[in-house]
Amino acid sequence: MCGIVGYNGKKKAVDILLDGLSKLEYRGYDSAGIAIKDKNIEIFKAKGKLINLQDKIKDKNLKGTIGIGHTRWATHGEPSENNAHPHVSNNGNVTLVHNGIIENYQELIQKLEKHNYKFYSDTDTEVLTNIIDYYYNKYKIGPIDAINRTMVRVRGSYAIAVMFKDYPDEIWVARKDSPMIIGQNDDGTYVASDVPAILKYTKNVYYIDNLEAACLKKDKVIFYDLNGDVIKKEMQEIKWDVSAAEKEGYEHFMIKEIYEQPEVIKKTINSYIQDNTIDISRSNLTQEEIKDIKEIYIIACGSAYHVGVCAQYILEDLTKIPVRVEIASEFRYRKPLLNKKGLAIIISQSGETADSLAALREAKNAGIKTLGIINVVGSSIAREADHVLYTLAGPEIAVATTKAFSTQLIITYILAIEMAHVKRKINKKKYLELIKEIQTIPDKIKNILEDDTNNIQKLSSKFSYVHDAFYIGRNLDYAISLEGSLKLKEVSYIHSEAYAAGELKHGTISLIEPNTLVIGVITQDEIYEKTISNLVEVKSRGAYIITVNPNKIDVNKVADFTINIPETNKYFYPSLTVIPLQLLSYYITVSKGLDVDKPRNLAKSVTVE
Ligand code: F6R
């Protein structure tokens, strides 16, 4: 998705804007641009990678200390220099960058055309720029009123950064349903759509709410509500390390983030478990509220949905509360019947995924309690959910999630144990036993990384040629197969599918040919023999079988290659089995020579429907 960065201060804006945009590259983009005010506002844009923009401006000696920049991920209009941001109003008075989508832009074009506005691009953003300009000129009311009238008039989602020719020392920003943070230090003020863009410069930020605007001056930020009244905001400190958003010697962010997992899982565990006791009181979800919960709805997208599938098995088994897991984009449009005593759990790394946010609002409108499992502090879902449990994964830069996924899993285990204990479905002994075992997970992952990486790397180079892969397992092993399969296809572009092992024979087995790659995940004591039988069925049709299993499970008669993982409690195996699956996807992709951190067509945070 698109990225925004802006700076107003003492330093040369061009360096800060380009550096900030480079930190936003991971979000996915197809063109980039900046506007810098020196004597006049100068705009530079280029299609393709940021390097093209850098080449364009390298001899320009841009000295301006105020400017805005953008990486564009095309929605309205093809990726091109013409459609790239910043856009400028007809009379050159308003220069703007925008994330999001303006839904009623056609209607706004008609309105503006009646007033002789002309359009040079195919974007909804150019329309937005001119609407601001239209209100600004019509009412002679100054930036805040022009922006507020625009916010009332447009439908859709947006985060905007605007420069007005008549207000050369200010950047104006506003947002609705699209992320934006504002930072400040002694050198100036900053705006960005995402923390990593400004983390290097400041950890002191303000969160701007929906339908609010702000004026960034060189030494202060003034916030306004939709009435144009000034509002006060507290500055907050971001806890993320700057180094977490840098590669630090690793070839790619994905592998760095895979290796960070023991550490961030430990941090997440330690923030909710102390002295063998779970404490989730920071979420404000009380024991009384937990006792009252009659149903659980887990709602999420993509990998976060897969965490939900794992959590469904664990929560239901431990708490004996019925659990349903739903894809957010389906949930939001299907008018589900929800128990008033239900709890909706929204899982999201970014906290900004449009469908998950909409699902949260649906659940709130239905009058049920909501709990977010979120990584980005201050994100929309974190702010709107009744309760929040934060994952402490730190900034996740690789498009394909790994460490956020793993910390989300951990939170669901902690929640399941706590709820089961509060509801008296497990006794103190079981509670302590599970807590003890959870704390062993970071070291067990470390062991997998130490023991298995080399073999997986060697194996992976053999599979860069494959066209199809199937991941199979039962129960929690099926849940993690969904994630393994997504991980492979999204970064390596190899077609892959996950199947409940028992379901394969109902159609999909016809796709198995000699050397088709089948990955069997086999950890669950009660049913492993059944998965092995399913693997035998595909092996006898020529499939090449990789298994991921603890040593105690004998896979000799099926596996062509075995990845052993340490033993753990049956509920926690997903945290271990996912590690080799992540490594497999990573190394297969690297051996194909693909850009593993930025797979084609994908965006890190999906803020459009
Ligand atoms: C896949 C991946 C995506 C996200 C999904 C939800 O590797 O990262 O499938 O899990 O887009 O994103 P969040 O968690 O930000 O809501």
Image (cartoon, rainbow, N blue to C red):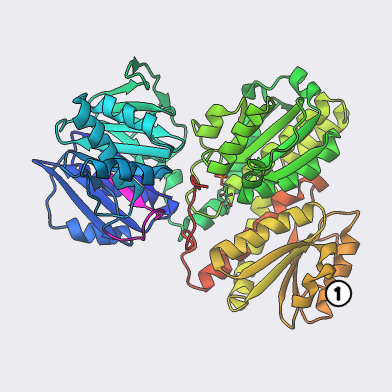
When the figure is inspected, residue 167 is found, relative to residue 402, above or below; the finding is above
Secondary structure type for disc 1? helix
As for residue 412 lying within the magenta part, the answer is no
Amino acid found under the numbered disc labelled 1 = Glu
Residue 195 image-quadrant placement: top left
Residue 331 image-quadrant placement: top right
- Measuring 35% from the left and 18% from the top, which residue is drawn there? 227
When the figure is inspected, residue 572 is found, relative to residue 411, above or below; the finding is below
Q: Residue furthest front?
A: 114
Residue 333 image-quadrant placement: top right
When the figure is inspected, residue 55 is found, relative to residue 329, above or below; the finding is below
When the figure is inspected, residue 496 is found, relative to residue 211, above or below; the finding is below
Is 430 positioned to the left or the right of 110 in the image?
right
Q: Nearer the viewer, residue 187 or 294?
A: 294
Q: Could you say where residue 585 lies in the image, as x and y percent from the top left?
A: 60, 64
- Measuring 24% from the left and 48% from the top, which residue is drawn there? 34
Which residue has dot 1 on it?
537
**Count of numbered labels shown in the rendering:** 1
As for residue 71 lying within the magenta part, the answer is yes
Q: Could you say where residue 501 lies in the image, as x and y percent from the top left?
A: 82, 63
Is 105 positioned to the left or the right of 388 in the image?
left
Q: Residue 451: tell me if it is visible.
A: no
Start and end of the magenta stretch?
65-81
Q: Could you say where residue 586 lies in the image, as x and y percent from the top left?
A: 56, 63
Is 218 positioned to the left or the right of 205 in the image?
left
- Measuring 30% from the left and 30% from the top, which residue is drawn there? 147
Q: Nearer the viewer, residue 60 or 300?
A: 300
Q: Could you say where residue 463 lies in the image, as x and y percent from the top left?
A: 62, 76
